[in-house]
Amino acid sequence: FPVPGQYVVEIDIVHLSGAVSSAMRNITCRYVRREIRSLSYDDRNRFFDAAEALMNLDKDPTIAVATNWTRGLAYYVRKHLRNAVANKRSDRMHDGMGFLTQHLAITSDYERALQAMDAQVCLPYWDFTIDAARYNLSGWEQASLWDTDLW
């Protein structure tokens, strides 16, 4: 969905027999996650302001009181480092089946933290396939992701 809001979704199911079933539902889209380079100037600033508030949460207790959130950025860094260890047998963040689930869990919690700072913020993603298609393996450092204007 392009923007949060109410949508009507209709699905047609074609059965093996050739019969068609239809279903229609009203759904609510609460937020839309976007590629970081597609964020508007205002959305990008809101994201960075929320991230900065999380960085300062441990140093400024008024942020925790105002947002009712107690885990700052340092919590997420510690959690990642604690589970990503040099011993590959014990690394629950990067090796084996834990990669997707562990990163999804910490990313989801981090997004909730950002939204505690600003309810309109969603964690953007980086679509590395854009740069891979454009630059292949060389010249990726020229990608717009690294422009100082973006940051």
Image (cartoon, grey):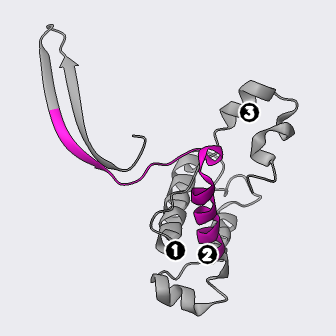
Q: Give the amino acid type for the residue marked by disc 3 in the picture.
A: Asp
Q: Which mark is residue 54?
A: 2
Mark 3–mark 2 distance (CA, rounded to whole Å)? 29 Å
72 and 67: which one is in front? Answer: 67
Q: Residue at x 59, y 51 (%)?
A: 40
Figure quadrant of residue 56: bottom right
Kindly identify the residue that appears in the image at 63 percent across and 48 percent down.
36
* Residue count near mark 2 (Cα–Cα under 10 Å), binned few <14, some 14–19, many ≥20: many
Q: Nearer the viewer, mark 2 or mark 1?
A: 1
In the rendered structure, which amino acid carries the disc numbered 2? Leu
In terms of depth relative to the viewer, which is nearer, 46 or 51? 46
Which of pointers 1 and 3 lies earlier in the amino acid sequence? Answer: 1
Give the magenta range: 24-53
The dot on residue 105 is none
Find the distance from the CA under tag 2 to the CA under tag 1. Answer: 8 Å
Residue located at (58% from left, 65% from top): 46
Q: Which residue is mark 3?
A: 131
Q: Which amino acid, by three-letter code, is at mark 1?
A: Met
Q: Indicate the position of residue 146 as horizontal and vertical percent values.
A: 80, 47
Q: Relative to 31, does residue 136 appear above or below in the rendering?
A: above
97 or 130: nearer the viewer = 130
